[in-house]
């Protein structure tokens, strides 16, 4: 797919350690823009479906869509003293004595094919390595990506992204706020992590919420009624998105199935926006079906 990138401009900047701003510029009424949201790539695991991951990242690149990865980009369980994994679950090129040293460099070389990789954040797999080995895989990967010309930024375990849409030749800006958190908990068979939505909305205010971690994918679409500063009743959409993983763990044996867990979907979400400057509204279009395996 060929894309006219001069008509799809966007800028990504950091405002604080866990606050970023994504601004789409040069827009006119009726334009649409997209962002690829994902987490839990587990890139170095032999269970990572790199074919599907590459397809999704390539589609984002073709559409000039910013790419966000919210934690557990690495599986990083192949270290000598790591009780969570074993060497045969690590890709052959990483079955080396200096695994943690090679991992971010080789991964960065692979992800460098996708210059729209705007944001990477740590998950529990990365923070476990930092705690136990005093190695910051996110920082090492960012340094390697920057050396290859990418401008990828690092966020926090949780954070905010201001998503702004600026009208062409005008100072008019429409905005949505994305709150992200890598995720927590086990994602019970009944609640599938949905109960976390109610907890999160009470503590963090946003238009869009994204989390991963439990390798499930679901959506909760809510409408919030409130009083505007001008005294008007208005209704606003809130999206709660849970992204799954790219790790296929439903095997004849292993941790996943031994804990009674079934197969999981692969992939994250496309966040699609249609912009109306006249109505001063931004419509969020839901999941694109091509994200399903």
Image: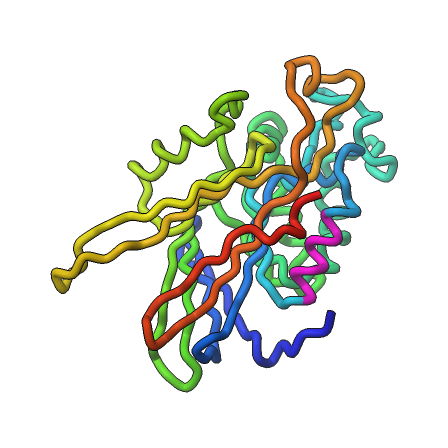
Q: Residue 15 placed where, x, y %?
A: 40, 58
Residue drawn at the location 51% of the way across and 27% of the way down: 192
Residue drawn at the location 35% of the way across and 49% of the way down: 206
Marks counted in the figure total 0
User: Is 236 drawn above or below residue 248 in the view shown?
Assistant: below
Magenta-drawn segment: 53-62
In the rendered image, the quadrant that contains the N terminus is bottom right
Q: Residue 228 placed where, x, y %?
A: 18, 59
Locate residue 213 relative to residue 174 in the image: left or right: right
User: Is 39 drawn above or below residue 272 in the view shown?
Assistant: above
Nearest the camera: 178 or 260?
Answer: 260
Residue extending furthest toward the left: 231
Nearest the camera: 180 or 95?
Answer: 180
Residue drawn at the location 48% of the way across and 63% of the way down: 273
Q: Residue 269 placed where, x, y %?
A: 57, 49
The image quadrant of residue 116 is: bottom right
């Amino acid at each position: 797919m060929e894309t006219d990138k001069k008509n799809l401009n966007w800028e990504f900047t950091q405002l604080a350690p866990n606050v970023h701003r994504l601004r789409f510029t040069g827009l006119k009424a009726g334009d649409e823009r997209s962002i690829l949201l994902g987490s839990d790539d587990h890139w170095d695991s032999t269970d990572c479906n790199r074919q599907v991951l590459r397809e999704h990242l390539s589609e984002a690149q073709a559409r000039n869509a910013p790419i966000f990865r919210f934690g557990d980009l690495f599986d990083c369980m192949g270290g000598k003293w790591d009780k969570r994994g074993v060497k045969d679950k690590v890709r052959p090129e990483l079955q080396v004595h200096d695994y943690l040293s090679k991992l971010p460099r080789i991964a960065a070389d692979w992800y460098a094919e996708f210059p729209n990789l705007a944001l990477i954040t740590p998950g529990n797999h990365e923070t476990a390595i930092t705690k136990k080995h005093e190695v910051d895989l996110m920082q090492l990967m960012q340094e390697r990506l920057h050396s290859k010309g990418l401008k990828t930024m690092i966020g926090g375990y949780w954070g905010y992204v201001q998503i702004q849409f600026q009208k062409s030749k005008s100072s008019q800006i429409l905005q949505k706020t994305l709150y992200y958190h890598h995720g927590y908990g086990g994602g019970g068979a009944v609640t599938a992590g949905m109960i976390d939505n109610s907890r999160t909305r009470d503590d963090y205010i946003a238009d869009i919420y994204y989390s991963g971690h439990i390798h499930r994918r679901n959506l909760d679409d809510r409408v919030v009624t409130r009083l505007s500063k001008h005294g008007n009743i208005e209704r606003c959409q809130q999206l709660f998105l849970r992204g799954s993983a790219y790790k296929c763990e439903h095997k004849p044996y292993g941790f996943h199935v031994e804990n009674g867990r079934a197969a999981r979907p692969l992939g994250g979400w496309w966040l699609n926006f249609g912009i109306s400057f006249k109505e001063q509204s931004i419509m969020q279009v839901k999941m694109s079906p091509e994200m399903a395996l």
